[in-house]
Image (cartoon, helix red, strand yellow):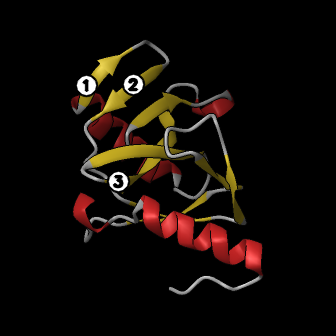
Amino acid sequence: MTAVEYGHGKRHHVLSDYTFAVRDAGRLLNIGKAYAGLTDAEIREYTDHFLKHTVEDRGHWRRVEPNVVLEIAFNNIQRSDRHESGYALRFPRIVRLRPDKTLGEIDTLERVKEIYAGQRAGTPPRD
């Protein structure tokens, strides 16, 4: 994760909106944001974590040290001018936290391009 935001409604007091990225030539490029998938207990625990690992605080939004890896499910990928990666995941949702993974193991922009090209050609993505 590269950034977090305070949620809305019952989650207005916890950091529950997560921006995530892919790797590209030593950089992290944002590709999406997810709000769903973690339990309330996990959100509380990670709110404490992100408060301690904030790099930039803009009140409602925080840039954080990228030291948490998520597994994300999504419907498809589309081109996007909104994200640095040039792509956006459609309907992303958090499958699980991946404390067993490092930043060096997250997906790459090249992998995103492969999936994008495959979905345009009607080819299912490989795992």
The answer to which image quadrant residue 101 occupies is: bottom left
Mark 2 crowd level (few <14, some 14–19, many ≥20, 10 Å Cα): many
Drawn side of residue 29 relative to residue 112, left or right: left
Q: In x, y percent, where is residue 123?
A: 70, 85
The residue wearing badge 1 is 55
Q: In x, y percent, where is residue 104?
A: 23, 63
The answer to which image quadrant residue 121 occupies is: bottom right
The residue wearing badge 3 is 24
Residue name at image x 53 percent, y 64 percent: 112
The residue wearing badge 2 is 62
- Is 103 situated above or below 53? below
Residue name at image x 49 percent, y 38 percent: 84
Drawn side of residue 112 relative to residue 76, left or right: left
The amino acid type found where label 3 is placed reads: Asp
Q: Toward the viewer: 48 or 1?
A: 1
Mark 3 crowd level (few <14, some 14–19, many ≥20, 10 Å Cα): few
